Every structure is written in structure tokens, then in C-alpha cells.
Image: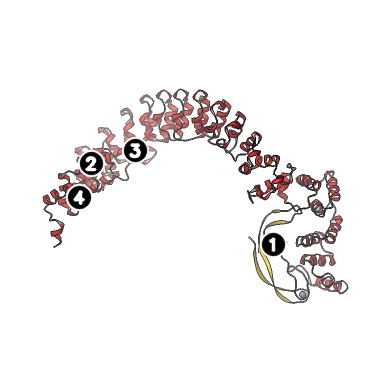
Amino acid sequence: MSTMGEVSYKCPYCGKEFDYETQFSYTIFGKMLDFRPYGAACVPTPVPKCPECGFVFFENSFSENEINKLKEKIKTDDIFKTEPDMPNYYYLAREFELLDRNIDDIIHYYQCAIWQGCFTEKLSNILFSYIDKVDINNKNYYPYKLIQIDLLRRMSRFDMAADLITTLKNDSAFPKNYGKLLDYQLILTEQKDTDEHEMSETQLVKYKNPHVRMAIANLDEERWYDLSKIPDEVKTEDFWLEVVSVHGQVFRQVPEKMKNYKMYLAVVKADGLSLENIPRKFLTEKICLAAIKNEKGDHRLKFVPDEFKTPEICLNAVKKNGTNLRYVPEELKTSEMCLIAAKESNYSLLFDIIPKHLLTPEICLEAVKNNFSLSVVPPKLRTPELCLIAVREHGSNLEDVPEDLKTPQMCQIAVQKYVSWGYNLRYVPEKFKTKKICHDAVQNFGLALEHVPEEFKTPELCLAAVQKCGLALEYVPEKLKTPELCLIADQYDGNLLNMPRESKTQKIRLLAVQKQGGSLFFVPEELKTPELCLAAVQNDPWALNAVPEELKTPELCLAAVQNERLCLEFVPKKLKTLIRNGAGICAPKIQNV
Ligand SMILES: [Zn+2]
């Protein structure tokens, strides 16, 4: 972006006040070979010129003393009158020249004048004469030489440009990072190219064909993809081969008759074409391997014909993407390959495609780390280390730990690490149920009280359980059910929403709907029993809406409608009359009278 705006200036030479369009900010994308920046910008940035006397200046760039000195000089050498209609920067350069100021500024301003469109023999020669005055101690010594080469070439003075290139190539002090620039200028000079070129193109110096360079440079910069801008006669087979080797995606523009094996190979190496788009007659092991090795060749093993699926291709494919394992022929799968696949991918079905006889503890470890349940690991591979890691990942994995491998430490982790893990107390062997572990489990999750041995159910523990979840009252021994404890339990609202699934036993569901009939809405359809539905409807007639049609018995509907006649809405059609009569409700018509 370039931001422009009018700014007021006062001419330091004649005192005239005027407005001038000024550039405040801009964006530069890159540089041309003569170091001219290009981008969303006015280059060179506009410099104000007095409309009265023609003086060109940047604010504060001249002292009063210098202005007076200039006035003296201009008396005899009026550059504004003798050389009218020159670019603003030309006058600025001349003013600096008259004041004998810094040579780098003078060179820069002459260069700006050329950029302003005044690329003449005369101006170039002035510029060259200044460049000649600069010695090796100036930090711009070499950039100036490079500018000179570019201007010479663009002026068709190819021999002079080539001479200068040779001189610099033999100059041991020439900076290495400019080396490619010399190579590129040499190519352009040899090709008698007088166009302007971008600095970034120098990296394409290995491409001798200028059309290839142009195509690749534009594709690199994402300026255009349509190569129809380049004349057909220069788009030879070699042209296409070089371009698709870098930008595979333009392959679609290659004329059919030029598509050959070499080009397909180049394209799969560069990406831009997946194996599925390559005609079968061109597919070879080499092409398949090149495609698989390609950075973006993710799922391509699918498109490799079976006869080319070598161990090398398969291993490469699996390294790229573990899910490729599913396209590896059974006889080529190895434990090593499966482990790579397991590590590379956490794809949830992967475990099913690893043959059971190739499973190793390492593969199972990857599976468990990737959220697989310990239950998928064959019992003989459930090592103590694996079980401990599995339990750390998910406490409920304790269920699938072989009894003889469960340790007190493992059980403690399984019930304690997270709040909802308390209920895993049910997988803790009786011999490890200590007072502490029961307490920790109940503290995490009240309903864990269900699995606490009777001798540990102290009044304190029962209170803790009921405070966590009122429904835990169910598991409090009768003798400990004090009125206070029941009162606390009663405050629990019977909401099933926030409870872990595994703790919702049928008994708990019944207690919940008895407390809050609406909880029936959160019970899965297949678990809604007649008993549960009746209990829910007796507590809240609106729960009838959550009762499955086949469970809406006359008895149940009546229980609901007797309490809330508006619930008649949820009574099945065939029962409506019966229920209406049973509940003593008048037909709507009569009711409205
Ligand atoms: Zn003026």
C-alpha cells in the first residue's frame, strides 16, 4: 500500500508557499537488477519542486548558507532555465553537485532521475563518471558496478557490460553474495536482452532459456499461472519439462502430444499430479517411488499398482503417512513398518489393520498413548509398564489390567487423577481398597460409595459422598441414614446431565427420575423401562413427552393426565378418548362453550 497526501511546503530558495503530493508510506515487494525497488509505491518517492522558481528540495536538506551559495552559482549556471523539463531528481542531483556534496547522494539522485523515466545516454554517462570516481573504500563500490552493468546492457552496450562482468569475476574482493548476479547478467548480455529484470530472477540463473525463466519467475511470485501469455512457438518440450519440474501444477497446460514419460516423472517429483492422474501405460516403479517420496504424496500408495508395491515404496509411503499401511500387501507388512505407522498416525482405525501377529509392546504403547483403550491390546502384551501408562491416560483402563498386574499405586492413580475418575473404584481389587483410596474416590465422585466396603462406610465418608451427590444416599447403610444426611441428599435435584455415563446405573436413573421426572429426557431410549417411565411421570406429568410410544400404556397416560390435563397432547391417538374419559376431561368442543 502507498499512502499519499497533499503537504504544504515553503520554498527555501524563493520563499513561495505551495502544496505538493507527498508519499507517506508504501510497500516494497522486491528490487530490479539496478536496485530500483518495486511494489505498491511511487518509486522514486516524489520530491517537491517549487512552481515559482523550479527549485527542488527535501525539507531541511539545505542550510541558509547553502541556499546563498546556490544563488551565487545559479547566477552563472541557471540549471532551471538552461535545462528545462528534466525530472525533479535531476535538479536535486545538480543542486547537490553545485554544492559539492556527498557523492553517494549525487549518484542516488541521478539514478532516481533515470528511474523517473529519463534513461538517456547523457544521464547514464554522467552517472558512470561519478561511479568511476568512487573507490574500493566506498561501501557501495560493488553495487554501483552492478548498476553500471545493468544500464550498459539495457543500452545495448553488451561488450562493455561483458568486460565489466569479467573484471568483477576476476576481482577476488567481489562479494560472494552478488556472484549469481554476475552470472545472470552474463546470460542476459549473451542473449542481448535489453529488458529490465528482477533481482529475484537471478536464482533462476541455471535456466538458460529466457522463456523458462520468465514462466518460473511469474509462477514463483504467484503472479500468473496461465502460460498462454507465452507464445506457443517457444513452448517446446524442453520448455515444458523445465517448467513442470518446478511447478508441477501447470502440467495440465502441456499439450497432449508433448506429454511423455520423462515429463510425468518430472511432475510427480515436483508434485502437482497424483499417481491417479497418470495413464497406466506410463506407470513404472520409478514413477511410483518418486511420487511416494514427494513431500505431498500422502495417501498415494492407494494408486500404486500392486506389482510395483516393493518394500521400499511401502515403507516410504508409511513414513509419509501411517494410514498408507492399509494399502500395504499383507505379506509386506512388518512389525517395524507397523510401528512407524502407529507412531506417524493416530488414525483411529489403524489398529485394526495391523495384523495381530505383528503387534509388539512398542506398537501397543503407541496405540494406548493415542487414546486407544487397553482392551484392544492382546492380554499377553499387557506388560506392567504398558498398563501403568494406559491407566495414566485413562483411569478406566484399570478394568482391562490383568488382576495380578494391578498395584496399589496404579489403583490410586485410576481413582484420583481426575474428578470423574472416582468411580473407577469399581475396578480396584478388594484387597487394595484401603480407607484412603475409598476416601479419595468418594471425594472425587460421591457415587463411588457404591463400591466402598461396608466397614469403611463411616458417617464422615457417607456425608462426603452425599454432599457430592445426593443419590449416593442409596449406598449409605440404614443405620447411618440420619435425618440430617437425608435432608442434604434431598437437596440434590436428580439431574443426570452432569454425571459420568458409567456411573448412571439403572438404580441411579430410577432415583433420579423419582426426584426429577424430567431427567427421563436424558435417559437413552433403549434404557427407558416401564418402571422408569412410570416413576418419572408420577413425579412430573410432562415427562410423558419423553416416554417411548410403545411404553405409553393407559395406566401411564392416565397417571400423567390426571395430574396435568394438558399432557393429553402426548397421549397416543388411539388412547385419547379412553384417557379423556378416565380423567374426566370434557371433549374440547364442549369445554370451549
Ligand atoms: Zn521557489
Residue 250 in which image quadrant: top right
Residue 541, labelled with which disc?
4
| Depth order, front residue of 506/85 | 85
Q: Indicate whether 39 appears above or below 60.
A: above
Sooner in the amino-acid sequence: mark 2 or mark 3: 3
Residue under label 3: 422
Cα distance, mark 2 to mark 3?
21 Å
Residue 212 in which image quadrant: top right
| Mark 1 surroundings within 10 Å by alpha-carbon count, few (fewer than 14), some (14 through 19), many (20 or more) | some
Query: Residue flagged by tag 4: what amino acid is it?
Result: Pro
Q: Indicate whether 91 appears above or below 527.
A: below
As helix, strand or loop, the secondary structure at mark 4 comes to helix
Query: Residue flagged by tag 3: what amino acid is it?
Result: Gly
Residue under label 1: 42
- Horizontal side of residue 213 vs 588, given as left or right: right
Question: Depth-wise, is mark 1 or mark 2 nearer the camera?
Answer: 1
Residue under label 2: 510
Cα distance, mark 4 to mark 3?
34 Å
